[in-house]
Amino acid sequence: MSRFDEEIDRYGTHSVKWDMMERIYGVPAQDGVGKDGLAMWVADMDFRPPTCVQNALQSMLDHGVYGYYGDDQSYREAIQWWMQTRHNWSIDAKSIFTTHGLVNGVAICLETYTAPGDGVVLFTPVYHAFARTIRAAGRDVVECQLTQGEAGYEMDFDAYDAQMTGKETMVILCSPHNPGGRVWTKEELQGVADFARRHDLILVSDEIHHDLTMPGQTHLPMPLVDESIQDRLVMLTAPSKTFNIAGAHCGNVIIADETLRARFAARMMGLGMSANSFGLFMTEAAYSPEGAAWVDELVPYLDENRKLFDAGVNAIPGLKSMEMQSTYLAWVDFSGTGMTREEFTNRVQNEARIAANHGPTFGTGGDSFLRFNFATPRARIIEATERLQAAFGDLQ
Protein backbone atom coordinates (compact mmCIF):
# COMPACT_ATOMS: atom_id res chain seq x y z
CA MET A 1 0.00 0.00 0.00
CA SER A 2 1.39 3.38 -1.00
CA ARG A 3 1.62 6.19 1.53
CA PHE A 4 -0.62 8.11 -0.86
CA ASP A 5 -3.46 5.58 -0.46
CA GLU A 6 -4.25 6.77 3.06
CA GLU A 7 -7.59 8.58 3.12
CA ILE A 8 -7.14 11.59 5.39
CA ASP A 9 -10.37 13.22 6.54
CA ARG A 10 -9.96 16.93 5.80
CA TYR A 11 -13.58 17.86 6.46
CA GLY A 12 -13.91 20.33 9.32
CA THR A 13 -10.25 21.44 9.16
CA HIS A 14 -10.85 24.83 7.48
CA SER A 15 -9.93 23.23 4.16
CA VAL A 16 -11.15 25.37 1.27
CA LYS A 17 -11.31 22.28 -0.90
CA TRP A 18 -13.52 20.22 1.41
CA ASP A 19 -15.25 22.70 3.72
CA MET A 20 -16.29 25.20 1.03
CA MET A 21 -17.54 22.89 -1.69
CA GLU A 22 -21.12 22.83 -0.43
CA ARG A 23 -21.34 26.60 -0.24
CA ILE A 24 -19.78 27.12 -3.68
CA TYR A 25 -20.96 24.07 -5.64
CA GLY A 26 -23.86 22.73 -3.60
CA VAL A 27 -22.02 19.44 -3.06
CA PRO A 28 -22.28 18.40 0.62
CA ALA A 29 -19.28 16.79 2.26
CA GLN A 30 -19.63 13.83 4.60
CA ASP A 31 -21.38 14.40 7.92
CA GLY A 32 -22.45 10.93 8.94
CA VAL A 33 -25.97 11.08 7.50
CA GLY A 34 -25.39 10.14 3.91
CA LYS A 35 -23.56 13.22 2.64
CA ASP A 36 -20.59 11.95 0.67
CA GLY A 37 -19.39 14.59 -1.76
CA LEU A 38 -15.99 14.31 -3.44
CA ALA A 39 -13.88 17.48 -3.55
CA MET A 40 -12.01 17.56 -6.87
CA TRP A 41 -11.67 21.28 -7.45
CA VAL A 42 -9.05 23.31 -5.51
CA ALA A 43 -5.51 22.53 -6.69
CA ASP A 44 -4.10 21.04 -3.54
CA MET A 45 -3.46 17.37 -2.86
CA ASP A 46 -5.06 15.14 -0.24
CA PHE A 47 -1.63 13.85 0.80
CA ARG A 48 0.68 14.72 3.69
CA PRO A 49 3.97 16.35 2.65
CA PRO A 50 7.24 14.46 3.03
CA THR A 51 8.54 13.66 6.50
CA CYS A 52 11.36 16.18 6.14
CA VAL A 53 8.78 18.98 5.96
CA GLN A 54 6.87 17.63 8.94
CA ASN A 55 10.11 17.38 10.91
CA ALA A 56 10.99 21.00 10.11
CA LEU A 57 7.67 22.14 11.53
CA GLN A 58 8.07 19.90 14.56
CA SER A 59 11.47 21.47 15.25
CA MET A 60 9.84 24.90 15.22
CA LEU A 61 7.16 23.71 17.63
CA ASP A 62 9.72 22.08 19.92
CA HIS A 63 11.70 25.32 20.05
CA GLY A 64 8.53 27.25 20.77
CA VAL A 65 9.67 30.77 19.92
CA TYR A 66 8.33 32.16 16.63
CA GLY A 67 10.33 35.31 16.06
CA TYR A 68 11.49 37.10 12.93
CA TYR A 69 13.42 34.96 10.44
CA GLY A 70 16.99 36.01 9.70
CA ASP A 71 20.01 34.80 7.71
CA ASP A 72 18.26 33.14 4.78
CA GLN A 73 21.42 31.87 3.10
CA SER A 74 20.58 28.18 3.61
CA TYR A 75 17.05 28.81 2.34
CA ARG A 76 18.37 30.41 -0.85
CA GLU A 77 20.94 27.63 -1.27
CA ALA A 78 18.15 25.03 -1.04
CA ILE A 79 16.27 26.77 -3.86
CA GLN A 80 19.44 26.97 -5.93
CA TRP A 81 20.18 23.27 -5.32
CA TRP A 82 16.66 22.24 -6.33
CA MET A 83 16.58 24.24 -9.56
CA GLN A 84 20.05 23.06 -10.57
CA THR A 85 19.50 19.42 -9.61
CA ARG A 86 15.94 19.00 -10.83
CA HIS A 87 15.81 21.43 -13.75
CA ASN A 88 19.42 22.06 -14.80
CA TRP A 89 18.78 25.74 -14.12
CA SER A 90 21.51 27.74 -12.40
CA ILE A 91 20.29 30.81 -10.54
CA ASP A 92 21.98 33.57 -8.56
CA ALA A 93 20.96 33.79 -4.90
CA LYS A 94 20.51 37.55 -5.31
CA SER A 95 17.81 36.97 -7.94
CA ILE A 96 15.40 35.29 -5.48
CA PHE A 97 12.49 37.18 -3.89
CA THR A 98 10.02 35.48 -1.57
CA THR A 99 6.34 36.41 -1.83
CA HIS A 100 3.19 35.22 -0.08
CA GLY A 101 2.50 32.64 -2.77
CA LEU A 102 2.54 33.14 -6.52
CA VAL A 103 -0.79 34.92 -6.91
CA ASN A 104 0.77 37.52 -4.65
CA GLY A 105 3.86 37.37 -6.87
CA VAL A 106 1.72 38.07 -9.94
CA ALA A 107 0.06 40.98 -8.17
CA ILE A 108 3.42 42.57 -7.31
CA CYS A 109 4.58 42.08 -10.91
CA LEU A 110 1.49 43.94 -12.10
CA GLU A 111 2.17 46.78 -9.65
CA THR A 112 5.84 46.92 -10.62
CA TYR A 113 5.82 46.65 -14.40
CA THR A 114 2.37 47.80 -15.57
CA ALA A 115 0.03 50.76 -15.06
CA PRO A 116 -3.77 50.98 -14.68
CA GLY A 117 -5.42 50.55 -18.06
CA ASP A 118 -2.55 48.52 -19.53
CA GLY A 119 -3.35 45.28 -21.34
CA VAL A 120 -2.04 42.02 -19.88
CA VAL A 121 -2.01 39.03 -22.24
CA LEU A 122 -3.19 35.58 -21.17
CA PHE A 123 -3.24 32.41 -23.27
CA THR A 124 -6.71 31.13 -22.40
CA PRO A 125 -8.21 29.03 -21.00
CA VAL A 126 -5.73 29.40 -18.14
CA TYR A 127 -5.49 29.50 -14.34
CA HIS A 128 -8.39 31.66 -13.21
CA ALA A 129 -6.52 33.70 -10.55
CA PHE A 130 -4.52 35.49 -13.25
CA ALA A 131 -7.54 37.27 -14.76
CA ARG A 132 -9.07 37.93 -11.37
CA THR A 133 -5.88 39.60 -10.13
CA ILE A 134 -5.36 41.59 -13.34
CA ARG A 135 -8.87 43.02 -13.23
CA ALA A 136 -8.66 43.79 -9.51
CA ALA A 137 -5.49 45.77 -10.23
CA GLY A 138 -7.30 47.90 -12.79
CA ARG A 139 -5.55 46.38 -15.81
CA ASP A 140 -7.26 44.89 -18.87
CA VAL A 141 -7.22 41.18 -19.61
CA VAL A 142 -6.30 40.43 -23.23
CA GLU A 143 -7.34 36.86 -24.02
CA CYS A 144 -5.37 35.04 -26.71
CA GLN A 145 -7.24 31.79 -27.13
CA LEU A 146 -5.35 28.53 -27.41
CA THR A 147 -6.28 26.13 -30.17
CA GLN A 148 -6.74 22.37 -29.78
CA GLY A 149 -4.37 20.09 -31.64
CA GLU A 150 -3.50 16.42 -31.42
CA ALA A 151 -1.21 16.97 -28.43
CA GLY A 152 -3.64 19.25 -26.62
CA TYR A 153 -3.47 23.02 -26.59
CA GLU A 154 -1.36 24.88 -29.14
CA MET A 155 -0.51 28.55 -29.74
CA ASP A 156 -1.33 30.59 -32.85
CA PHE A 157 1.07 33.53 -32.76
CA ASP A 158 -0.10 34.95 -36.09
CA ALA A 159 -3.56 35.36 -34.59
CA TYR A 160 -2.13 36.79 -31.38
CA ASP A 161 0.02 39.30 -33.25
CA ALA A 162 -3.11 40.56 -34.99
CA GLN A 163 -4.83 41.10 -31.63
CA MET A 164 -2.17 43.40 -30.20
CA THR A 165 -3.07 47.10 -30.02
CA GLY A 166 0.06 48.57 -28.44
CA LYS A 167 -1.60 48.98 -25.04
CA GLU A 168 -0.26 45.63 -23.86
CA THR A 169 2.74 45.71 -21.51
CA MET A 170 2.88 42.19 -20.04
CA VAL A 171 2.20 38.58 -20.96
CA ILE A 172 1.73 35.85 -18.36
CA LEU A 173 2.59 32.29 -19.36
CA CYS A 174 1.51 29.19 -17.43
CA SER A 175 4.23 26.56 -17.96
CA PRO A 176 3.38 23.72 -17.62
CA HIS A 177 -0.13 24.72 -18.53
CA ASN A 178 -3.02 24.72 -16.08
CA PRO A 179 -5.67 23.49 -16.84
CA GLY A 180 -4.63 21.73 -20.05
CA GLY A 181 -1.58 19.94 -18.67
CA ARG A 182 0.67 20.76 -21.62
CA VAL A 183 4.43 20.67 -21.20
CA TRP A 184 5.35 23.29 -23.79
CA THR A 185 8.08 22.35 -26.27
CA LYS A 186 11.25 24.38 -26.72
CA GLU A 187 9.88 25.68 -30.03
CA GLU A 188 6.62 26.80 -28.41
CA LEU A 189 8.46 28.52 -25.57
CA GLN A 190 10.72 30.25 -28.08
CA GLY A 191 7.56 31.42 -29.80
CA VAL A 192 6.38 32.99 -26.54
CA ALA A 193 9.75 34.69 -26.04
CA ASP A 194 9.71 36.06 -29.59
CA PHE A 195 6.11 37.24 -29.13
CA ALA A 196 7.07 39.11 -25.96
CA ARG A 197 10.03 40.70 -27.70
CA ARG A 198 8.02 41.72 -30.80
CA HIS A 199 5.44 43.53 -28.71
CA ASP A 200 7.82 44.82 -26.00
CA LEU A 201 6.11 42.87 -23.22
CA ILE A 202 7.38 41.86 -19.80
CA LEU A 203 7.17 38.06 -19.75
CA VAL A 204 6.02 36.52 -16.46
CA SER A 205 6.45 32.75 -16.57
CA ASP A 206 4.53 30.92 -13.84
CA GLU A 207 6.20 27.51 -13.55
CA ILE A 208 4.59 26.33 -10.31
CA HIS A 209 3.76 22.87 -11.73
CA HIS A 210 7.27 22.30 -13.11
CA ASP A 211 8.08 19.35 -10.80
CA LEU A 212 4.90 17.44 -11.63
CA THR A 213 5.56 16.21 -15.16
CA MET A 214 4.36 12.76 -16.12
CA PRO A 215 6.91 10.03 -16.91
CA GLY A 216 8.54 10.64 -20.29
CA GLN A 217 7.94 14.40 -20.16
CA THR A 218 10.58 17.07 -19.45
CA HIS A 219 9.83 20.62 -18.41
CA LEU A 220 12.13 23.31 -19.80
CA PRO A 221 12.53 26.49 -17.70
CA MET A 222 12.14 29.63 -19.79
CA PRO A 223 15.70 30.94 -19.07
CA LEU A 224 17.10 27.81 -20.76
CA VAL A 225 15.10 28.49 -23.91
CA ASP A 226 16.45 31.93 -24.82
CA GLU A 227 19.09 33.65 -22.70
CA SER A 228 18.50 36.94 -24.49
CA ILE A 229 14.95 37.13 -23.04
CA GLN A 230 16.32 37.70 -19.51
CA ASP A 231 16.02 41.48 -19.80
CA ARG A 232 12.22 41.15 -19.82
CA LEU A 233 11.73 37.83 -17.96
CA VAL A 234 10.29 37.26 -14.49
CA MET A 235 10.16 33.66 -13.26
CA LEU A 236 7.65 32.36 -10.70
CA THR A 237 8.26 29.11 -8.81
CA ALA A 238 7.02 27.62 -5.54
CA PRO A 239 7.16 24.39 -3.53
CA SER A 240 3.42 24.57 -2.83
CA LYS A 241 2.03 22.34 -5.61
CA THR A 242 4.99 19.95 -5.53
CA PHE A 243 4.86 19.23 -1.80
CA ASN A 244 1.25 20.13 -0.95
CA ILE A 245 2.14 23.07 1.29
CA ALA A 246 0.04 25.79 -0.37
CA GLY A 247 -1.18 26.98 3.03
CA ALA A 248 2.36 28.15 3.81
CA HIS A 249 1.90 30.87 1.16
CA CYS A 250 5.55 30.82 0.17
CA GLY A 251 6.50 31.50 -3.46
CA ASN A 252 9.59 32.73 -5.25
CA VAL A 253 9.96 35.42 -7.88
CA ILE A 254 13.30 34.92 -9.62
CA ILE A 255 14.67 37.79 -11.70
CA ALA A 256 18.06 37.56 -13.39
CA ASP A 257 18.14 41.07 -14.89
CA GLU A 258 19.47 43.68 -12.47
CA THR A 259 17.25 46.50 -13.71
CA LEU A 260 14.05 44.45 -13.46
CA ARG A 261 15.24 43.16 -10.10
CA ALA A 262 15.81 46.64 -8.69
CA ARG A 263 12.30 47.72 -9.70
CA PHE A 264 10.75 44.66 -8.09
CA ALA A 265 12.78 45.10 -4.90
CA ALA A 266 11.68 48.73 -4.61
CA ARG A 267 8.04 47.75 -4.99
CA MET A 268 8.30 45.05 -2.34
CA MET A 269 9.96 47.53 -0.03
CA GLY A 270 7.16 50.01 -0.66
CA LEU A 271 4.59 47.37 0.25
CA GLY A 272 6.41 46.54 3.50
CA MET A 273 6.62 42.85 2.65
CA SER A 274 8.62 40.19 4.42
CA ALA A 275 8.46 36.41 4.38
CA ASN A 276 6.59 34.04 6.69
CA SER A 277 9.13 32.00 8.64
CA PHE A 278 6.99 28.85 8.55
CA GLY A 279 7.05 28.88 4.76
CA LEU A 280 10.81 29.42 4.66
CA PHE A 281 11.52 26.49 6.98
CA MET A 282 9.16 24.24 5.03
CA THR A 283 10.64 25.23 1.67
CA GLU A 284 14.21 24.62 2.78
CA ALA A 285 13.27 21.20 4.15
CA ALA A 286 11.34 20.26 0.99
CA TYR A 287 14.09 21.27 -1.44
CA SER A 288 16.36 18.45 -0.31
CA PRO A 289 17.35 14.91 -1.34
CA GLU A 290 14.60 13.53 0.93
CA GLY A 291 12.07 15.84 -0.68
CA ALA A 292 13.28 14.78 -4.13
CA ALA A 293 12.84 11.10 -3.28
CA TRP A 294 9.27 11.82 -2.14
CA VAL A 295 8.47 13.57 -5.43
CA ASP A 296 9.93 10.64 -7.35
CA GLU A 297 7.44 8.42 -5.51
CA LEU A 298 4.55 10.85 -5.92
CA VAL A 299 4.68 11.35 -9.69
CA PRO A 300 4.17 7.67 -10.68
CA TYR A 301 1.24 7.53 -8.27
CA LEU A 302 -0.32 10.58 -9.89
CA ASP A 303 0.31 9.08 -13.31
CA GLU A 304 -1.61 5.92 -12.39
CA ASN A 305 -4.44 8.06 -11.05
CA ARG A 306 -4.42 9.98 -14.32
CA LYS A 307 -4.67 6.80 -16.36
CA LEU A 308 -7.53 5.47 -14.25
CA PHE A 309 -9.46 8.72 -14.32
CA ASP A 310 -8.97 9.28 -18.05
CA ALA A 311 -9.96 5.72 -18.90
CA GLY A 312 -13.12 6.00 -16.82
CA VAL A 313 -14.10 9.38 -18.23
CA ASN A 314 -13.25 8.59 -21.84
CA ALA A 315 -15.43 5.47 -21.66
CA ILE A 316 -18.47 7.76 -21.36
CA PRO A 317 -19.77 8.74 -24.82
CA GLY A 318 -19.43 12.47 -25.39
CA LEU A 319 -16.80 13.05 -22.68
CA LYS A 320 -13.13 13.58 -23.44
CA SER A 321 -10.33 14.18 -20.95
CA MET A 322 -7.57 16.20 -22.61
CA GLU A 323 -4.31 14.27 -22.84
CA MET A 324 -2.19 15.75 -20.08
CA GLN A 325 1.56 15.77 -19.69
CA SER A 326 1.87 17.51 -16.32
CA THR A 327 0.00 18.63 -13.18
CA TYR A 328 -2.66 16.60 -11.35
CA LEU A 329 -5.59 18.37 -12.99
CA ALA A 330 -7.75 16.69 -15.62
CA TRP A 331 -9.46 18.99 -18.13
CA VAL A 332 -12.62 17.26 -19.31
CA ASP A 333 -14.61 18.37 -22.36
CA PHE A 334 -18.37 17.68 -22.23
CA SER A 335 -19.21 19.21 -25.62
CA GLY A 336 -19.71 15.82 -27.23
CA THR A 337 -22.72 15.14 -25.03
CA GLY A 338 -24.75 17.85 -26.76
CA MET A 339 -25.80 19.07 -23.32
CA THR A 340 -25.84 22.65 -22.14
CA ARG A 341 -23.22 23.67 -19.60
CA GLU A 342 -25.89 23.85 -16.92
CA GLU A 343 -27.10 20.33 -17.68
CA PHE A 344 -23.73 18.54 -17.60
CA THR A 345 -22.60 20.55 -14.57
CA ASN A 346 -25.80 19.62 -12.74
CA ARG A 347 -25.18 15.94 -13.41
CA VAL A 348 -21.63 16.14 -12.07
CA GLN A 349 -22.55 18.12 -8.96
CA ASN A 350 -25.98 16.78 -8.05
CA GLU A 351 -25.94 13.24 -9.40
CA ALA A 352 -22.26 12.26 -9.19
CA ARG A 353 -21.82 14.50 -6.10
CA ILE A 354 -18.45 15.78 -7.27
CA ALA A 355 -17.21 19.35 -6.94
CA ALA A 356 -15.10 20.32 -9.97
CA ASN A 357 -13.94 23.71 -11.25
CA HIS A 358 -16.23 25.30 -13.85
CA GLY A 359 -14.53 25.81 -17.20
CA PRO A 360 -15.67 29.40 -17.91
CA THR A 361 -13.68 30.67 -14.92
CA PHE A 362 -10.53 29.86 -16.90
CA GLY A 363 -11.45 32.30 -19.66
CA THR A 364 -12.30 32.05 -23.33
CA GLY A 365 -12.33 28.47 -24.55
CA GLY A 366 -13.38 26.91 -21.26
CA ASP A 367 -17.18 26.85 -21.62
CA SER A 368 -17.60 23.14 -22.30
CA PHE A 369 -15.06 21.97 -19.71
CA LEU A 370 -14.77 21.04 -16.05
CA ARG A 371 -11.45 20.65 -14.23
CA PHE A 372 -10.99 17.67 -11.90
CA ASN A 373 -8.21 17.30 -9.33
CA PHE A 374 -7.05 13.67 -9.14
CA ALA A 375 -4.34 14.16 -6.47
CA THR A 376 -6.26 12.06 -3.97
CA PRO A 377 -6.13 8.43 -2.81
CA ARG A 378 -6.78 5.99 -5.63
CA ALA A 379 -9.95 4.60 -4.09
CA ARG A 380 -11.54 8.03 -4.53
CA ILE A 381 -10.53 8.11 -8.20
CA ILE A 382 -12.23 4.77 -8.75
CA GLU A 383 -15.30 6.04 -6.89
CA ALA A 384 -15.36 9.27 -8.92
CA THR A 385 -15.25 7.49 -12.28
CA GLU A 386 -18.01 5.09 -11.20
CA ARG A 387 -20.18 8.02 -10.12
CA LEU A 388 -19.61 9.86 -13.39
CA GLN A 389 -20.43 6.78 -15.43
CA ALA A 390 -23.66 6.36 -13.46
CA ALA A 391 -24.57 10.06 -13.80
CA PHE A 392 -24.18 9.85 -17.58
CA GLY A 393 -25.43 6.27 -17.83
CA ASP A 394 -28.14 7.15 -20.34
CA LEU A 395 -25.41 7.96 -22.89
CA GLN A 396 -23.88 4.49 -22.73
Image (cartoon, helix red, strand yellow):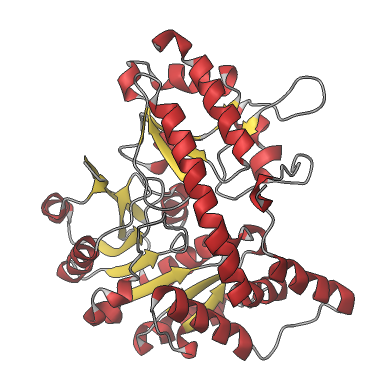
- Splitting the image into 4 quarters, where does residue 157 fall? bottom left
- Residue 209: percent from left, percent from top: 46, 59
Residue furthest out toward the front: 1
- Image point 36% across, 67% down: which residue? 204
**Residue 282 x, y percent position in the rendering:** 67, 71
User: 1 and 373: which one is in front?
Assistant: 1
Seen at 40% across and 11% down, the residue is 395
Q: Residue at x 25, y 81 (%)?
A: 227
- The vertical placement of 113 against 74, above or below, is above
Work out whether 146 lies above or below 38. Answer: below
Which picture quadrant has residue 175?
A: bottom left
Q: State left or right for residue 241 relative to residue 144.
A: right
| Quadrant of the snapshot with the C terminus | top left
Residue 154 on image: x %, y %: 22, 49
| Residue 63 as seen in the image, left or right of residue 150 | right
Asked whether 85 or 193 is in front, the reply is 85
Q: Is residue 59 left or right of residue 197?
A: right
